[in-house]
Image (tube, rainbow, N blue to C red):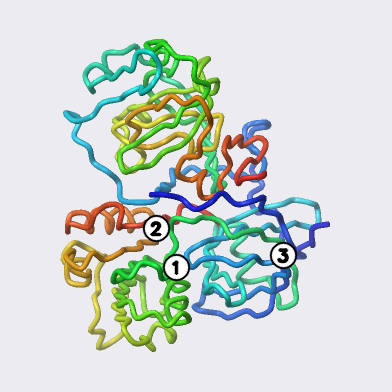
C-alpha cells in the first residue's frame, strides 16, 4: 500500500463545458475544457464547485470518465433528492463555466504498469472510473486481458452501452440486469453473488488485479466474494459511492 | 471570481443547526462507507490493541480492552467526501486512558489497522477527552463495514482520521503521512478549516 509522492496545492479553476452526452435517461457525460490541467491517472476523481446567484455554494466529487491525455470528462448520475447532480444533468449547457479542482486520489488507479489480468466489477455508475481504465488501456496499446462484470438495474440503465458493446481486443464484458431484462436476454439476471463472481473472475493463480466500484452494499459483497475466492486483499481495490448528490 | 451557475440553487432548505456543520459539508442520515479495500474480519481471539514505541510499549487483548473504563459519547462526524452525520452515539475507551498507560514524549502517532491502513495524528488531538477507540455504535457492536470490531473515533477531524479496524498506535518523534495523506490528503484534516487536501 505504498503511496505516491505528496502533491502540491490543488487550486480551483474555471472549466468550460465542451459537450454533453446523454448516456441514459438519468446519466450524462460532461466534457470540459480545463485551461490548466496537470494530467490525471485512470481511476482518479475531481471536485466540482457550483455557485448560485445568491452566493450559495456546493461541492461534490466525481470520478473522471476520460483516460489520461483525453479532455477531462465526468459522467454524472442524477439523484432525484440531490442538489448538484440534477443541475449538472438537466440545467448545464455547452459553453457554461463551472469550477473544479483535481485530480484527487491515487490508490484506485491503473497506469498500465501492472501486467496482471484485470478484473473490473461495476455496480451502476461505479462503471465510470473503470471506463477510464479501459480507455487508458486502449490508448497505451496494453494487451493486459480484462474481464468486466457490470451490474445495472435494466438495459436502459447501462452507461457507455455502445462503447462497452464494442469489446476491444482482450476485453470481455459481462452484464447482469437485476430488475428488468429485455426479451431474449441471455446475460445474468440477478444481483452479483459468489457463484457469478466465481464464473467471471480470473483464477487466483493468474495473480489478477481487481477494481470494484459501486454502491456500498455492492462493493462489500463483491470484495468479500473475491477474498473468499482467494484474492489477496491488497489485490482488490475498492471505491464506494456513498450518498452524494 | 467564481462563475455563477444560473438556475442552480440550494435544494435543501431545512435549517441545519447553527455551528454544527462545517463549510462545504451537508447533513446525511445515512451512514456511508468509504474504504480502499475489502473489509477485514479479524477473530477477536487474535485481536490486540498496541501502543508501540515509548518507554513501555503496551498491548491489550480483546477481554482486557473490554475491561478498561469505557465512555458513551454522542458526537457529530464529518467525512471529507462532504457528508456530515449529527448525533452519532459511540461507546469505547478514551485515548486518555490508553495513553496514560504508557510513558513517552513523542508528539505524533501513526495509527495502524487490519488491512494495512494507516493515518497520522498529533498526540495533542488524542488527549483531553477528544478521542476514543470505539467498539460500539448506536447501542450495538460496531459493524465490520464501519470499522468493527474497533475503530478510532476522533470526531473533531475529518473522518478518515478515525481509522477503521484499528489495531494500535505507533508513537513517532516526527509527523509522517499515513495512507490517504500520502495520496495528497491533508496531514491534519480540520473540517472547520476545510483541510481536505495538501495545501488547503
Camera-nearest residue between A175 and A54: A175
Identify the residue at image location x=29%, y=74%.
Answer: A176
Q: Which residue is mark 3?
A: A98
Residue B146 figure quarter: top left
Asked if both marks, 3 and 2, belong to the same chain, the answer given is yes
Camera-nearest residue between A39 and B33: A39
Position of residue A70 measured from the top left corner of the image (x, y, whole percent):
58, 77
Residue B50 figure quarter: top left
Quote the CA–CA distance across marks 1 and 3.
28 Å
Look at the picture and state if B200 lies above or below B89: below
Quote the CA–CA distance across marks 2 and 1.
24 Å
Look at the picture and state if A153 lies above or below B27: below
Chain letter of mark 3 equals A
Q: Which residue is mark 2?
A: A215
Q: Answer few, some or many: residues within 10 Å of disc 2's Cα (few below 14, many 20 plus, some between 14 and 19).
A: many
**Sequence order check, earlier mark of 2 and 1:** 1
Position of residue A41 measured from the top left corner of the image (x, y, whole percent):
51, 66
**Secondary structure category for the residue under label 3:** strand
Q: Which residue is mark 1?
A: A111
Look at the picture and state if A200 lies above or below B75: below
**Secondary structure category for the residue under label 2:** strand
Q: Answer few, some or many: residues within 10 Å of disc 3's Cα (few below 14, many 20 plus, some between 14 and 19).
A: many
**Sequence order check, earlier mark of 3 and 2:** 3
Amino acid at each position: 500500500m505504498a503511496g505516491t509522492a505528496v502533491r502540491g496545492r490543488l487550486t480551483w479553476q474555471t472549466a468550460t463545458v465542451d459537450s454533453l452526452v446523454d448516456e441514459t435517461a438519468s446519466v450524462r457525460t460532461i466534457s470540459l475544457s480545463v485551461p490548466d490541467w496537470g494530467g490525471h491517472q485512470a481511476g482518479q476523481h475531481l471536485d466540482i464547485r457550483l455557485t448560485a446567484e445568491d452566493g450559495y455554494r456546493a461541492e461534490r466529487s466525481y470520478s473522471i470518465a476520460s483516460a489520461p491525455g483525453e479532455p477531462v470528462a465526468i459522467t454524472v448520475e442524477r439523484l432525484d433528492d440531490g442538489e448538484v447532480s440534477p443541475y449538472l444533468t438537466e440545467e448545464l449547457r455547452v459553453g457554461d463555466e463551472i469550477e473544479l479542482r483535481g485530480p484527487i486520489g491515487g490508490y484506485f488507479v491503473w497506469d498500465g504498469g501492472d501486467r496482471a489480468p484485470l478484473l473490473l466489477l461495476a455496480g451502476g455508475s461505479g462503471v465510470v472510473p473503470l471506463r477510464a481504465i479501459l480507455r487508458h488501456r486502449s490508448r497505451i496499446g496494453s494487451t493486459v486481458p480484462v474481464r468486466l462484470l457490470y451490474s445495472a438495474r435494466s438495459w436502459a440503465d447501462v452507461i457507455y452501452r455502445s462503447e462497452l458493446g464494442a469489446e476491444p481486443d482482450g476485453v470481455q464484458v459481462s452484464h447482469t440486469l437485476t430488475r428488468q431484462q429485455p426479451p431474449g436476454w441471455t446475460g445474468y439476471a440477478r444481483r452479483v453473488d459468489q457463484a457469478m463472481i466465481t464464473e467471471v473472475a480470473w483464477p487466483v493463480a493468474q495473480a489478477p488485479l481487481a477494481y470494484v466500484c459501486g454502491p456500498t452494499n455492492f462493493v462489500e459483497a463483491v470484495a468479500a466474494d473475491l477474498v473468499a475466492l482467494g484474492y489477496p486483499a491488497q489485490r482488490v481495490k475498492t471505491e464506494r459511492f456513498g450518498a452524494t448528490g | 471570481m467564481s462563475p455563477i451557475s444560473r438556475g442552480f440553487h440550494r435544494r435543501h432548505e431545512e435549517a441545519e443547526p447553527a455551528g454544527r456543520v462545517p463549510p462545504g459539508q451537508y447533513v446525511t442520515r445515512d451512514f456511508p462507507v468509504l474504504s480502499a479495500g475489502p473489509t477485514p474480519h479479524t477473530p477477536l481471539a487474535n485481536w490486540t490493541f498496541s501502543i508501540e514505541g515509548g518507554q513501555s510499549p503496551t498491548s491489550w487483548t480483546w477481554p482486557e480492552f473490554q475491561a478498561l473504563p469505557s465512555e458513551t459519547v454522542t458526537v457529530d462526524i464529518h467525512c471529507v467526501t462532504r457528508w456530515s452525520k449529527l448525533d452519532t452515539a459511540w461507546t469505547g475507551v478514551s485515548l486518555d486512558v490508553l495513553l496514560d498507560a504508557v510513558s513517552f514524549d513523542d508528539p505524533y502517532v501513526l495509527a495502524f489497522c487490519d488491512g494495512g491502513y494507516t493515518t497520522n495524528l498529533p498526540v495533542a488531538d488524542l488527549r483531553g477527552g477528544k478521542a476514543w477507540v470505539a467498539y460500539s455504535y448506536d447501542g450495538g457492536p460496531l459493524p465490520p463495514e464501519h470499522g468493527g470490531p474497533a475503530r478510532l473515533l476522533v470526531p473533531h477531524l475529518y473522518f478518515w482520521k478515525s481509522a477503521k479496524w484499528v489495531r494500535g498506535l505507533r508513537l513517532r518523534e516526527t509527523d509522517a503521512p499515513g495512507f490517504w495523506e500520502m495520496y495528497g490528503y491533508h496531514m491534519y484534516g480540520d473540517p472547520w478549516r476545510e483541510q481536505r487536501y495538501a495545501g488547503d
